[in-house]
Image (cartoon, grey):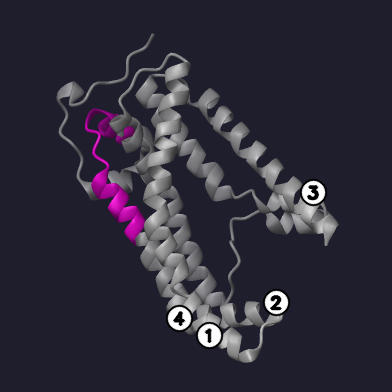
């Protein structure tokens, strides 16, 4: 059974927070080797959560964000007064939800990954798995900030990396649109980077880990598509 690199292995000095942030984007394997040896996660979790909250809050607090909420409420049948109130209050919910649930989801997913790899014979500490997972989130953080900027300038709330458009082009309703709406190119990239980190941690090949993570993601997308199709059929 391959043993993961121990903390402070190799005699290398720990990378700074900024070095790790940029390293995940430019040289993920080498960065993860340092992260595994020096499994620090608090600063990176605070940074990625903070960037995400600021990006979402800036968009929601803008006139563009307010107009989008207002339009959605009116299209849902709300009165002008109710829509105005929702647009004023609703803009605060997304950044608050991210601030609360992003760290909680991070801790939970890291625990699941630790358990899965323990069952398959892997050996690592929760702190190491948590550090790897937190650092893999840099990809989604950067993509989310870019997406928020694009939406602001385009006055839109579209996820530019989502495959929902492809699903809508293939079928107007049913399973296909729901399935593709759950797929996002950024998530695929994030899973690949996570697979690199887990491969470094558990001394395993990246490809099988990535395929396993992707399989789980596709199963979730299938469930989403089936649920959306069921609700659409009943409406």
196 sits left or right of 235 in the view: left
Mark 3: secondary structure: helix
Q: Where residue 36 is drawn, which disc sits there?
A: none
Residue under numbered circle 3: 175
Q: Is residue 196 visible in the rendered structure shown here?
A: no
Closer to the camera: disc 3 or disc 2? Answer: 2
Q: Earlier in the sequence, mark 1 or mark 2?
A: 2
Residue 129 percent location from the top left of the image? 35, 31
Mark 1: secondary structure: helix
Would you say the residues marked 3 and 1 are in contact, meaning their CB atoms lie under 8 Å apart? Answer: no
Q: Image height check: is 84 above or below 166?
A: below
Q: Earlier in the sequence, mark 3 or mark 1?
A: 1
Task: Tell how many labels.
Answer: 4
Is residue 39 a member of the stretch shown in magenta?
yes
Residue 192 percent location from the top left of the image? 50, 36
Quarter of the image for residue 130 reads: top left
Q: Earlier in the sequence, mark 1 or mark 4?
A: 4
Q: Which residues are magenta?
A: 31-50
Residue under numbered circle 1: 85
Residue 57 percent location from the top left of the image? 41, 71
* Quadrant that contains the N terminus: top left
Distance from disc 1 to disc 2, alpha carbons, whole Å, reads 14 Å
Quarter of the image for residue 32 reads: top left
Q: Earlier in the sequence, mark 4 or mark 3?
A: 4
Residue under numbered circle 4: 62
177 sits left or right of 74 in the view: right
Distance from disc 4 to disc 3, alpha carbons, whole Å, reads 35 Å
Q: Nearer the viewer, residue 64 or 139?
A: 64
Q: Nearer the viewer, residue 112 or 29?
A: 112
Residue 95 percent location from the top left of the image? 42, 66
Q: Residue at x 24, y 28 (%)?
A: 37
């Amino acid at each position: 059974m391959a043993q993961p690199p121990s903390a402070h292995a190799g005699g290398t000095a720990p990378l700074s927070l900024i070095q790790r942030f940029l390293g995940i984007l430019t040289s993920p394997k080498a960065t993860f080797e340092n992260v595994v040896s020096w499994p620090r996660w608090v600063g990176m979790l605070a940074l990625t959560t903070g960037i995400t909250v600021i990006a979402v809050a800036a968009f929601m607090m803008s006139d563009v964000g307010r107009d989008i909420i207002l339009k959605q409420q009116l299209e849902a049948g709300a009165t002008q007064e109710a829509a105005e109130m929702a647009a004023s209050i609703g803009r605060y919910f997304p950044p608050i939800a991210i601030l609360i649930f992003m760290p909680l989801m991070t801790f939970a997913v890291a625990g699941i990954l630790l358990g899965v790899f323990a069952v398959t014979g892997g050996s690592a500490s929760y702190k190491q798995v948590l550090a790897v997972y937190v650092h893999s989130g840099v990809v989604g953080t950067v993509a989310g900030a870019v997406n928020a900027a694009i939406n602001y300038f385009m006055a839109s709330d579209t996820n530019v990396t989502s495959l929902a458009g492809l699903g809508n082009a293939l079928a107007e309703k049913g399973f296909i649109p729901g399935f593709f709406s759950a797929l996002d190119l950024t998530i695929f990239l994030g899973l690949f980077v996570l697979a690199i980190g887990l491969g470094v941690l558990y001394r395993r090949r990246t490809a099988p880990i990535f395929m396993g993570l992707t399989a789980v993601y596709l199963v979730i997308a299938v469930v989403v598509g089936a649920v959306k199709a069921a609700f659409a059929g009943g409406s």
